[in-house]
Image (tube, rainbow, N blue to C red):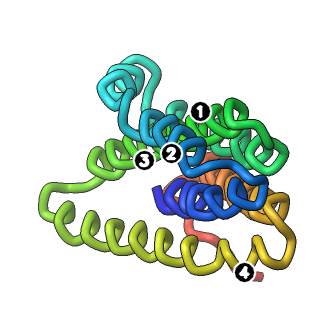
């Protein structure tokens, strides 16, 4: 959830500036953000159904895959339609990762833990959103939209690598230090 929020914020927040640099109008920028908002929230009921059918972890992986596609696609898109598709996929990837992550978190917690852990999680998500908003301008100024996409791609790939490593690690065995 935290990585999904961070990547989504990194790419989303700077896109209007990127589009302005490409000389797109405010109306065109609004159209791209309507597509993004549709991706974020328009399919939430379907996302819940897909989580029930496919599972939480696969849906998180599909979300990560969409974040990867959008992190690659957005920097190289210059037309309104391609940017709308990239930002729609960014929103949908966030939706899959966030809804599935929320379900997984709730499923893994005892009732007595839920309030505290979900509160910490919400705080981390908010910090990720703020951090993404703060640093994306600096990344954009230093290396353009390609740099923003590269950071989003790197963060998502790091998340997938960590998830795979944790999945393969034996559960319940203490790590030994040589």
Query: How far separated are the C-alphas under marks 3 and 4?
Result: 26 Å
Q: Nearer the viewer, mark 2 or mark 3?
A: 2
Rendered position, 97 above or below 120: above
Discs 2/1, front: 2
Q: Identify the residue at the far top of this view.
A: 53
For the residue pair 21 and 69, the one nearer the viewer reads as 21
Q: Residues within 10 Å of mark 4 (few under 14, many from 20)?
A: few
Of the numbered discs 3 and 4, the one sitting upstream in the chain is 3
Label 1, on which residue? 62
Name which of mark 2 and mark 1 comes first in the sequence: 2
Tags 3 and 4 in contact by the CB under 8 Å rule? Answer: no
Circle number at residue 138: 4
Which residue is drawn at the image coordinates 32% and 50% (left, top)?
108
Dividing the picture into quadrants, the one containing residue 18 is: bottom right
> For the residues carrying marks 1 and 4, which lies nearer the camera in this image?
4
Q: CA distance from mark 2 to mark 1?
A: 27 Å
Q: Which mark is residue 30?
A: 2
The reply, left or right, for residue 140 in relation to residue 28 is right
Can you identify the residue that label 3 sits on?
98
Provide the secondary structure element on which disc 3 rests: helix
Q: Which mark is residue 118?
A: none
**In which quadrant of the rendered image does the C terminus lie?**
bottom right
Which mark is first along the chain, 2 or 4? 2
Question: Which element is circle 2 on?
Answer: helix
Give the mark nearest the N terminus, 1 or 4.
1
**Given this view, does label 4 or label 2 mark the residue nearer the observer?**
2
Label 1 neighbour load within 10 Å: few <14, some 14-19, many 20+: some
Query: Label 1 vs label 3: CA separation?
Result: 11 Å
The answer, for residue 62, to whether it is visible in the render is yes
Horizontal and vertical percent for residue 34? 46, 39
Q: Position of residue 84 (x, y in %)?
A: 62, 36
Where is residue 172 shown, x and y percent of the image? 49, 58
């Amino acid at each position: 959830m935290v990585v999904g929020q961070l990547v989504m914020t990194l790419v989303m927040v700077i896109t209007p500036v990127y589009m302005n640099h490409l000389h797109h109008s405010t109306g065109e920028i609004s159209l791209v953000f309507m597509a993004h908002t549709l991706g974020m929230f328009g399919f939430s009921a379907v996302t819940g159904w897909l989580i029930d059918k496919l599972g939480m972890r696969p849906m998180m992986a599909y979300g990560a895959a969409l974040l990867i596609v959008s992190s690659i696609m957005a920097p190289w898109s210059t037309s309104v339609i391609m940017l709308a598709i990239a930002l729609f996929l960014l929103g949908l990837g966030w939706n899959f990762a966030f809804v599935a992550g929320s379900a997984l978190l709730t499923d893994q917690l005892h009732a007595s833990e839920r309030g505290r852990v979900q509160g910490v999680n919400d705080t981390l998500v908010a910090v990720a959103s703020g951090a993404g908003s703060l640093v994306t301008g600096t990344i954009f100024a230093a290396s353009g939209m390609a740099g923003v996409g590269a950071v989003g791609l790197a963060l998502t790939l790091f998340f997938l690598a960590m998830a795979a490593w944790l999945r393969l690690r034996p559960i319940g065995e203490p790590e030994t230090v040589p």
